[in-house]
């Protein structure tokens, strides 16, 4: 399924210092198609020595290479060319995400690939607008503040939005003049490798972007421990995020962590219920539920609870689960056998804890890792399925009576990434937006993000720092204060 229509696989290698190499160990690993479980390609597996070489090449690119000598305007041109090349190869990316990550073609045509292009174009626009300011602190001195690149950035990405998450890190880092070592998720390396090919074609100087497919516990671990890395930008699980923060503390590396979510989606009785049901379905089932900001805890006001459940279950039943390459498909598989088993164990937990299973609840009896859209109703916020991130197509619906109870339960979570509110009352909408503990609050919609808007959690299991927007440039630059004494 699929492989025959993927026009060309990208280069399979480690990108180090502008060259494609085999792993020093000579080892390879297989990337699989989650819709079939079959191998797609074998890829060199980066080891500790490859990490050393990549970090050294990144450092050289900044200190001695063409990259460090480029002006902001030069960097802007390279990033713009890269955006244009991704645009030109957009269908290849769509196909690679379909075969490697199980994403329906229409989904990455609409979301992942345009978002990546937009992100590259946006940060290309910033590259020559990163500047400091004169701060007249004293009459007898010229005092000013400049912004310098933080240096070598380790970018570590997950498998759920492989291209998009890589670009969210690479684009602002390169705009700021940093050099990057990217370790894509072992399960989905292909789109990052194509991005590397195009970066070379765009004229990105050697060593500015290095790409190391491989395993988290080997290449990832070596990268986060490496003394030559100045900054770690990570998207992934809370467990690995916390581990990274601990390792980074040894030599005080900069760290940005985009971690998990268990986002509340609150539907008031005065809402447009059909719109709420439709968006709540895509909000929790998009990407087979493998989205950090999935609206997995759906709180519904009692007066409309039964009606909402009907509309929501009806909408979910229209999802077409199947081959990501079939144009009719709206939901693909989850990423792996391990992920399928993990999700199914949560389904068992939900049943055991007494939530009412009103849709789905089973893995499909076919090759690949398909799980039917699953809805638990009559749940409460203390159940395991309402507290832990499942990262699969499982919704937990919880009734509420008073707005204060909805806020209390919504905020009673170790996560803080996103939240949504459905109401026609504008005052209530703003009050809820103010009181919900979440890095992003949507009102009468679920899930949109935009390159221009900062994205990230408010601590805890959702992590710290922001991707996207102007804020992300601060991740990749340091302020430098200069004091020039004019008179003694
Ligand atoms: P993960 O297991 O934490 O993996 C993320 C990345 O970290 C992978 O590249 C992984 O390599 C690597 N890694 C694993 N152990 C490492 C170590 N010891 N040192 C350095 N790197 C290491 O997460 P995942 O299962 O891929 O992704 C799912 C999680 O990501 C969910 O919790 C989800 O909420 C979160 N997520 C958050 C956002 C956001 O924007 N906040 C976006 C997407 C996903 P391997 O591939 O080899 O394991
Ligand atoms: Mg794969």
Image (cartoon, rainbow, N blue to C red):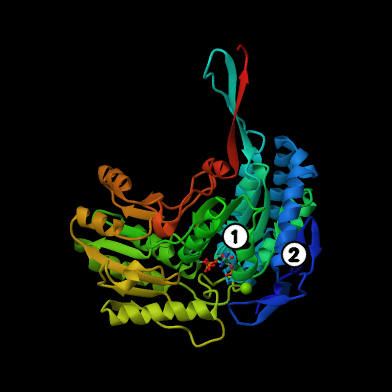
Q: Which comes sooner in the sequence, label 2 or label 1? A: 2
Residue 290 vs residue 428, the one in the foreground: 290
Q: At x 65% / y 80%, what residue is drawn?
A: 1
- For disc 2, the neighbor class at 10 Å (few under 14, some 14 to 19, many from 20) is many
SS of the residue at dot 2? strand
Where's residue 264, x and y in %? 34, 59
Label drawn at residue 14: 2
Q: At x 30% / y 59%, what residue is drawn?
A: 273
- For disc 1, the neighbor class at 10 Å (few under 14, some 14 to 19, many from 20) is many
Whether pointer 2 and pointer 1 mark residues with C-beta atoms closer than 8 Å, the reply is no
Counting the numbered discs, the total is: 2
Residue 474 vs residue 363, the one in the foreground: 474
Image quadrant in which you'd find residue 298? bottom left
* Ligand 1 positioned in quadrant: bottom right
Residue that mark 1 sits on: 156
SS of the residue at dot 1? strand
């Amino acid at each position: 399924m699929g492989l025959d229509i993927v026009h060309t696989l990208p280069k399979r290698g480690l990108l180090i210092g502008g060259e494609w190499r085999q792993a020093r160990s000579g080892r390879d690993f297989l990337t699989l198609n989650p819709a079939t479980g079959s191998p797609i390609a074998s890829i060199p597996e980066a080891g500790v020595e490859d990490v050393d070489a990549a970090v050294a090449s990144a450092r050289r690119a900044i200190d001695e290479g063409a990259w460090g000598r480029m002006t902001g305007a030069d960097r802007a041109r390279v990033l713009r060319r890269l955006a244009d090349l991704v645009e030109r190869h957009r269908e290849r990316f769509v196909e690679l995400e379909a075969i490697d990550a199980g994403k329906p073609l229409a989904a990455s045509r609409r979301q992942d690939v345009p978002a990546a292009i937009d992100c590259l174009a946006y940060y290309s626009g910033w590259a020559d607008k990163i500047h400091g300011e004169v701060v007249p602190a004293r009459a007898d001195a010229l005092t000013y503040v400049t912004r310098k690149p933080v240096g070598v950035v380790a970018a570590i990405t997950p498998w759920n939005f492989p291209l998009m998450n890589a670009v969210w890190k690479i684009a602002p880092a390169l705009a700021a003049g940093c050099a990057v070592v990217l370790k894509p998720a072992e399960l989905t390396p292909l789109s990052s490798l194509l991005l590397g090919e195009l970066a070379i074609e765009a004229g990105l100087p050697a060593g500015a972007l290095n790409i190391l497919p491989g395993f988290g516990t080997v290449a990832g671990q070596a990268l986060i421990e490496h003394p030559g890395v100045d900054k770690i930008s990570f998207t992934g699980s809370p467990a690995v995020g916390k581990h990274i923060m601990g390792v980074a503390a040894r030599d005080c590396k900069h760290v940005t962590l985009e971690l998990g979510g268990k986002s509340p989606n609150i539907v008031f009785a005065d809402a447009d219920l059909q719109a709420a049901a439709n968006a709540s379905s895509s909000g929790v089932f998009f990407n087979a539920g493998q989205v950090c900001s999935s609206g997995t805890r759906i709180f519904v006001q009692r007066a409309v609870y039964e009606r909402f459940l009907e509309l929501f279950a009806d909408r979910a039943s229209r999802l077409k689960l199947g081959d990501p390459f079939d144009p009719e498909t709206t939901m693909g598989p989850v990423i792996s056998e391990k992920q399928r088993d993990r999700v199914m164990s949560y389904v068992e937990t939900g049943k055991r804890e007494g939530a009412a299973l009103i849709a789905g609840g089973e893995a499909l009896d076919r090759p690949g890792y398909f799980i039917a859209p699953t809805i638990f109703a009559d749940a409460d916020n203390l159940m395991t399925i309402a507290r832990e991130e499942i990262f699969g197509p499982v919704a937990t619906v919880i009734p509420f009576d008073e707005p204060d109870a909805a806020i209390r339960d919504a905020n009673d979570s170790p996560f803080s990434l996103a939240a949504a509110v459905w109401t026609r009352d504008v005052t209530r909408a703003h009050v809820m937006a103010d009181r919900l503990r979440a890095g992003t609050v949507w009102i009468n919609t679920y899930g949109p993000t935009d390159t221009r808007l900062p994205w990230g959690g408010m601590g805890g299991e959702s992590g710290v720092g922001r991707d996207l927007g102007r804020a992300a440039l601060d991740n990749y630059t340091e302020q430098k204060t200069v004091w020039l004494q004019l008179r003694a």
